[in-house]
Amino acid sequence: MTEKISTFQQALDVVEALKPEEQEILVDIVSRRLSQQRRSELITEVAQAKSDYEQGQIRRGSVADLMRELDE
């Protein structure tokens, strides 16, 4: 864990050494990359859910049905 904190601190030190405008550009780039990563993960999850549905691995029911199944 200490090594990760050290690496993180090093990254912060590098960022702090940048000009404010460069820091803003970096924040924008990181934000966009995180958004793209989340989008990609969501696409994968949706594709998996669609596949599960097509294979009949999805069950429907009410909350009461779910609770009853959990109690079994």
Image (cartoon, rainbow, N blue to C red):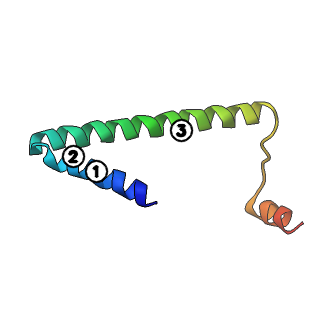
> Which x, y percent locates residue 4?
41, 54
> Which x, y percent locates residue 21?
10, 40
Q: Is residue 21 left or right of residue 35?
A: left
Mark 3 and mark 2: span between their CA atoms? 32 Å
Between 31 and 55, the one lying in front of the other is: 31
Give the residue at the far right of this rendering. 72
Mark 1 and mark 3: span between their CA atoms? 31 Å
Mark 1 and mark 2: span between their CA atoms? 6 Å
Between 53 and 36, the one lying in front of the other is: 36
Is mark 1 in CB contact (under 8 Å) with mark 2? Answer: yes
Dot 1 amino acid type: Gln
Dot 3 amino acid type: Leu
In the rendered image of this protein, does residue 34 appear above or below residue 71?
above
Q: Indicate the secondary structure of the residue bearing disc 1.
A: helix
| Residue highlighted by disc 1 | 10
Q: Residues within 10 Å of mark 2 (few under 14, many from 20)?
A: few
Between 68 and 42, the one lying in front of the other is: 42
Q: Quadrant of residue 32?
A: top left
